[in-house]
Image (spheres, grey):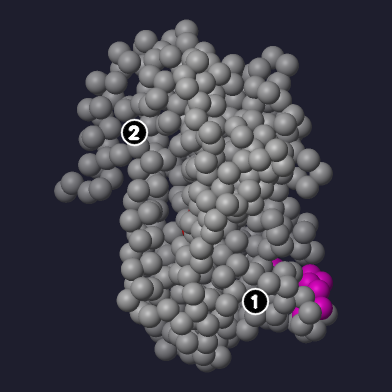
Amino acid sequence: MLTRRTFGLLAGASAATLAMPYYARAQGAPRVVVIGGGAGGATAARYIAKDAGDAINVTLIEANPQYVTCFFSNLYIGDFRSFDSITHGYDTLASNYGITVVNGYAQTIDREAKTVAMADGSKVPYDRLIVAPGIDMIWDSVPGYSEAAAEKMPHAWKAGPQTQLLKAKLDAIEKGQQIVMVAPPNPYRCPPGPYERISMFAHVLKAKGFTDNKIIIIDPKQTFSKQALFQEGWEKHYPGMVEWYGPDVHGGLKSVDPDTGEVETDLDTFKGALVNVIPAQKAGTIAASAGLTNEGGFCPIDPFTMRSKADETIYVIGDASIAGDMPKSAFSANSQAKVAAMAIRGELTGSKVFPARYSNTCWSLIETDDGVKVGAQYEPNDEKIASTSSFISQTGEDAALRKTTYEESIGWYSGITADIFGS
Ligand SMILES: Cc1cc2nc3c(=O)[nH]c(=O)nc-3n(C[C@H](O)[C@H](O)[C@H](O)COP(=O)(O)OP(=O)(O)OC[C@H]3O[C@@H](n4cnc5c(N)ncnc54)[C@H](O)[C@@H]3O)c2cc1C
């Protein structure tokens, strides 16, 4: 049977044969190495390879053989998407664009020698390096939490096995049992993400008739993204099910206990049959080890090009960067990747560099066909990447508009994944 995946493999195989002479021609050209094959890194690799042709030799280093998107992982949790539909491979980048895809973990960057040392001991030399490792967790930001504890209290803030674990725990919830989420402090990946996830938890419970089950959110923030829209939606679709506690109410998170499922705050101890702890975050570890981060744990960049402020041969894009007013999102990472790709091509081949423009939209699903969005356009200035105009869904919108907004997000997902991984 021809499935989406086998079709992809067949298409990749035939294109690989056609693309081979093109790849051979790229030997000897300047080398751009990209660390991280996610929303930012894979886009940058593809755009450089696509637009520079044989003038630049592109290598993409990625730890995992396949990429599971965090974006739309909430829809998998809510039973709106399959896990397979949010999983993507690198075959097309290799076969259709001549990108050398190295499946391995980049351990360190030697900025003097301009090489990336891989965990297996091999070295990858570069002329320009793009660092796009996404985020890593600050495990001890939540007392009692750890990498081991994440097997009992999943964060699922990097998609893959953690997402499947969270989904399995959600599906095992029984009538009357409670869910507790520990939400992250700013800055973190996908500002509306925790609250869309809460909506999906509630959707799954409601579909089973478990409308007496409670979902508690312990939030370190006073306010959160699209707050009025989410709170209106929870009241409308899931009355009495979701309780959000800001710091004024819970008084501070004291600890979590992965063995008992307890979350202790100043106010009370909450017990969850499912506890979803999303800790504080920092740039992917390799960025700090290479000296690209500041005291806040993320990477300062030049807003006009995404070039690292610490090293002029390195660019940092996506969640690892400090991108001014832009949120940490796949849309942002994809947008920043194109700016960095253009700047690097300009430097290495003399191609024309146009003024940087960035954009972002983040959609969230609250209940079936009830989609909302927030977004903005951005331009660089000497200080930062600054928002120039923005929009947000309104409370009280009619059902037809909300359905259109949701459908827009489906189109966006197919478009952006093709833009990242090729199609
Ligand atoms: C629940 C949730 C929902 C979200 N929903 C949305 C949404 O609707 N819209 C949206 O735009 N964004 C959304 N996001 C945010 C989005 O997923 C991230 O902002 C985006 O993936 C960031 O892209 P990135 O390239 O910086 O990092 P990533 O996409 O995480 O890619 C980093 C890659 O680098 C690899 N890597 C890291 N270190 C190394 C190393 N040393 N060696 C080799 N490989 C390495 C990793 O394996 C990974 O594949 C969501 C996030 C979450 C958690």
Q: The magenta stretch spans which residues? A: 250-258
Amino acid type, callout 2: Thr
Q: Are marks 2 and 1 in contact (CB under 8 Å)?
A: no
The amino acid type of the residue labelled 1 equals Ile
Can you see residue 267? yes
Q: Residues within 10 Å of mark 1 (few under 14, many from 20)?
A: many
Image point 43% across, 31% down: which residue?
47
Residue 217 marker: 1
Residue where numbered disc 2 is placed:
92
Residue that protrudes farthest toward the left in the picture: 1
Q: Which is nearer the eye, 337 or 118?
A: 337
Indicate the position of residue 225 as horizontal and vertical percent values. Answer: 60, 67
The local secondary structure at tag 1 comes to strand
The verdict on label 1 being within 8 Å of ligand 1 is no
Which part of the image, by quadrant, shows the C terminus? top left
Work out whether mark 2 precedes mark 1 in sequence or the reverse, and give the earlier one: 2
239 left or right of 21? right
* Cα–Cα gap, marks 2 and 1: 41 Å
Q: Reply above or below: 410 against 126.
A: below
Q: Residue at x 44, y 59 (%)?
A: 72
Q: Nearer the viewer, residue 348 or 23?
A: 348
